[in-house]
Amino acid sequence: MERLDKIIASQGKYSRSEVKKLIKAGLVTLNGEKVKSGDVKADAERDTITVNGEGICYKKHIYIMLNKPQGVVSATDDPFHKTVIDLVPPSLFRQGLFPAGRLDGDTTGFVLITDDGDFAHRILSPKNHIIKTYHATLEHSLTQEDIKKFTEGIELKDGTLCLEAQVKMLTEEPPVAEVKIHEGKYHQVKRMFAALGNRVVALRRVKMGGLDLDENLREGECRELTVKEFEAICDN
Ligand code: URA
């Protein structure tokens, strides 16, 4: 059981002070009864709560897919740049949102935004082997020897060893490779290609685990995941 005002505010649409005002105005009900005070306790999963005549469909956490454009930083706040959180529309916004994993400022594509710290930890841990798939436009194509090095685990220029990864060429003109990695070291994909004497000209994340970026989402747009999509992330 939790305070009713806290439950309502946790869903993002109303701030705690707005909830207090709504309660004072008699616009909040709990199981059909008008509520007189925010400190009433309720069971968020079971009780029926309405605000302003609208039912609250309680969700403990939210999971949002963003198609990140270039120039937006994967942070919760930044004094100089737009952040991925700035792109979340008010209808999906709630306190505590953060990007589960970072893309470089110039990398585009799939960023998962959530307020579920445990889930983020699970999908980011190399132990759990959630595969992240990228499309990398390269300066030049890969040799068979390069591809072999990816499958054996590339050694970065500073001596860091990467876990084995998969790579294949998707197109030759321009040279675009698909790369699948199980970890998320700083600038990892760019540094892997740099270790082979190549250069990433453009990078896009297209998949997390078993979930593809929705290509109907334009850059800068986001939407909430369905339960099936959420489950697909952990299903490589
Ligand atoms: N690897 C990179 O080099 N950059 C990213 O943004 C993601 C993976």
Image (tube, rainbow, N blue to C red):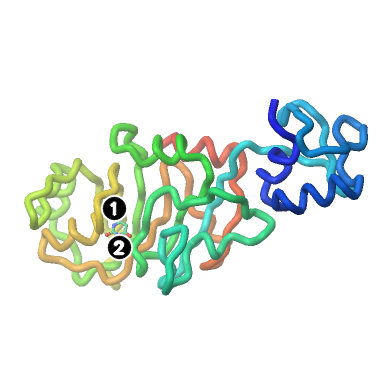
| Residue that badge 2 annotates | 136
**x and y percentages locating residue 52 in the rendered image:** 87, 49
- Horizontal side of 61 relative to 113 (left or right) equals right
**x and y percentages locating residue 35 in the rendered image:** 87, 37
Above or below: residue 195 compared with residue 201: above
**x and y percentages locating residue 82 in the rendered image:** 47, 70
- Does the residue at mark 1 contact the one at mark 2 (Cβ under 8 Å)? yes
Which residue is depicted at the point 47% across and 65% down?
A: 83
* Tag 1 secondary structure: strand
Nearer to us in this view, 212 or 37: 37
**x and y percentages locating residue 85 in the rendered image:** 52, 60
Given the image, on which type of amino acid does mark 1 rest?
Val
Above or below: residue 218 compared with residue 44: below
Nearer to us in this view, 106 or 228: 106
Image quadrant where one finds the C terminus: top left
Tell me which numbered mark, 1 or 2, is placed earlier along the sequence.
2
Given the image, on which type of amino acid does mark 2 rest?
Ala
Picture quadrant of ligand 1: bottom left
Above or below: residue 31 compared with residue 203: above
- Horizontal side of 221 relative to 160 (left or right) equals right
- Give the Cα distance between marks 1 and 2: 7 Å
Above or below: residue 47 compared with residue 86: above
Which residue is depicted at the point 69% across and 30% down?
A: 2
For label 2, the crowd category at 10 Å Cα-Cα, with few meaning under 14, some 14 to 19 and many 20 or more, is many
Q: Which of the 4 quarters of the picture holds residue 7?
A: top right
| Residue that badge 1 annotates | 179
Image quadrant where one finds the N terminus: top right
* Tag 2 secondary structure: strand
* Disc 2 CB within 8 Å of nearest ligand 1 atom: no
Q: Which of the 4 quarters of the picture holds residue 55?
A: top right
